[in-house]
């Protein structure tokens, strides 16, 4: 009886929101492909931004927090499609902001990845947590870094997201921002205590990632943040050697100005910038 009452109240809530929003009548059959369930139809309607048809599928028994054949809820589908109005409608009707796919992917992560700061704030207010990660350690903060939205990154940090908590393979938020060429986000992370010399399982640092991907502004931000200019992964190639091999004179000069060594200690021998330079000055024909 309680479930029936909840369904009735939910339908009434969506009905009132639909009436107020003025959505046009659209046949529900539009969203029912052969073999698709009412649940699939509900979630496809959410993805398409059709509030009127959401009501019809709810009346047919589709669950507000049920999953479609892809493991998504209506809220997650609306978020992934950028349908902000539908997301707000679903939340107002009682949809859960914490229901995730089987792999842990959440509406909060999806909103963060797309840079939708307004939805991120709404989902957190509705109970979503900045500390709920995927099994591999991927976090809402990592998702926000993908969006490139510096204000959103700062907001999540202010809400308690860790600037040093990385994935299970050691990939940190700072490394992600460095690789993507996001100097403002790199500075934001450093300002709140991100470790510039953290290493992933392959012994790579954020500075190595920035040099390897040619992100000069990020290199500048990291050296200003006192990143270790001589840190090298297992192959022994330092940031200076990689910059030399790339022929990036600005990076080479910047790293040398910061005291980068021209010699790296390897297991069997010393490899120096002097050895690297001929390798790149005479490219093979």
Image (spheres, rainbow, N blue to C red):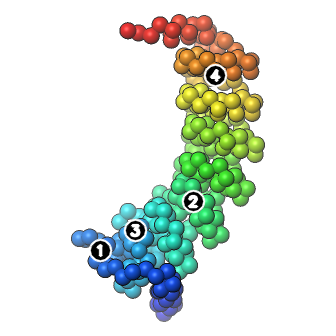
Residue 88 position in % (x across, y down): 55, 73
User: Residue at the location (65% across, 46% down)?
Assistant: 165
Picture disc at residue 30:
1
Whichever of callouts 2 and 3 sits on the residue coming sooner in the sequence is 3
Picture disc at residue 59:
none
SS at mark 3 in the image: helix
Q: Are marks 2 and 3 in contact (CB under 8 Å)?
A: no
Is 144 above or below relative to 277?
Answer: below
Q: CA distance from mark 3 to mark 4?
A: 47 Å
In depth, the one of 192 and 132 nearer the eye is 192
Quarter of the rendering containing residue 117: bottom right
Q: Are marks 1 and 2 in contact (CB under 8 Å)?
A: no
User: Residue at the location (41% across, 67% down)?
Assistant: 47
Check disc 4 and report the residue beneath it: 251
Q: CA distance from mark 1 to mark 3?
A: 11 Å
Q: CA distance from mark 1 to mark 2?
A: 28 Å
Q: CA distance from mark 2 to mark 3?
A: 18 Å
Residue 106 position in % (x across, y down): 52, 61
Is 185 above or below relative to 221?
Answer: below
User: What is the total number of numbered labels drawn onto the structure image?
Assistant: 4
Whichever of callouts 1 and 2 sits on the residue coming sooner in the sequence is 1
Check disc 3 and report the residue beneath it: 48
Whichever of callouts 3 and 4 sits on the residue coming sooner in the sequence is 3
Is 177 above or below relative to 19?
Answer: above
Whichever of callouts 2 and 4 sits on the residue coming sooner in the sequence is 2
Structural crowding at the residue carrying mark 1, measured as other residues with C-alpha within 10 Å and reported as few (<14), some (14–19) or many (≥20): few
Check disc 2 and report the residue beneath it: 116
Q: CA distance from mark 2 to mark 4?
A: 34 Å
User: Residue at the location (48% across, 66% down)?
Assistant: 83
Whichever of callouts 1 and 3 sits on the residue coming sooner in the sequence is 1
Whichever of callouts 4 and 1 sits on the residue coming sooner in the sequence is 1
């Amino acid at each position: 009886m309680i479930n029936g009452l909840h369904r009735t109240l939910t339908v009434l809530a969506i009905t009132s929101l639909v009436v107020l929003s003025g959505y046009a009548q659209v046949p529900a059959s539009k969203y029912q492909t052969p073999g698709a369930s009412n649940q699939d139809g509900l979630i496809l309607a959410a993805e398409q931004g059709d509030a009127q048809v959401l009501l019809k599928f709810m009346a047919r028994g589709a669950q507000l927090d049920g999953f479609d054949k892809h493991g998504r809820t209506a809220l997650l589908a609306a978020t992934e499609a950028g349908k902000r109005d539908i997301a707000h409608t679903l939340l107002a009707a009682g949809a859960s902001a914490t229901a995730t796919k089987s792999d842990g992917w959440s509406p909060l992560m999806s909103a963060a990845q797309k840079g939708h700061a307004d939805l991120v704030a709404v989902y957190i207010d509705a109970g979503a947590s900045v500390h709920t990660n995927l099994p591999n350690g991927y976090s809402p903060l990592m998702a926000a870094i993908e969006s490139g939205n510096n204000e959103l990154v700062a907001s999540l940090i202010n809400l308690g997201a860790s600037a040093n908590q990385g994935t299970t393979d050691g990939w940190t938020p700072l490394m992600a921002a460095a690789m993507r060429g996001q100097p403002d986000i790199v500075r934001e992370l450093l300002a709140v205590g991100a470790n510039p010399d953290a290493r992933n399982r392959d012994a790579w640092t954020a500075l190595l990632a920035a040099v390897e991907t040619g992100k000069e502004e990020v290199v500048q931000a990291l050296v200003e943040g006192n990143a270790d200019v001589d840190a090298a992964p297992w192959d022994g190639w330092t940031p200076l050697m990689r910059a030399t091999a790339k022929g990036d004179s600005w990076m080479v000069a910047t790293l040398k100005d910061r005291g980068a060594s021209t010699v790296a200690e390897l297991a069997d021998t010393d490899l120096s910038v002097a050895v690297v330079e001929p390798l790149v000055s005479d490219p093979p024909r």
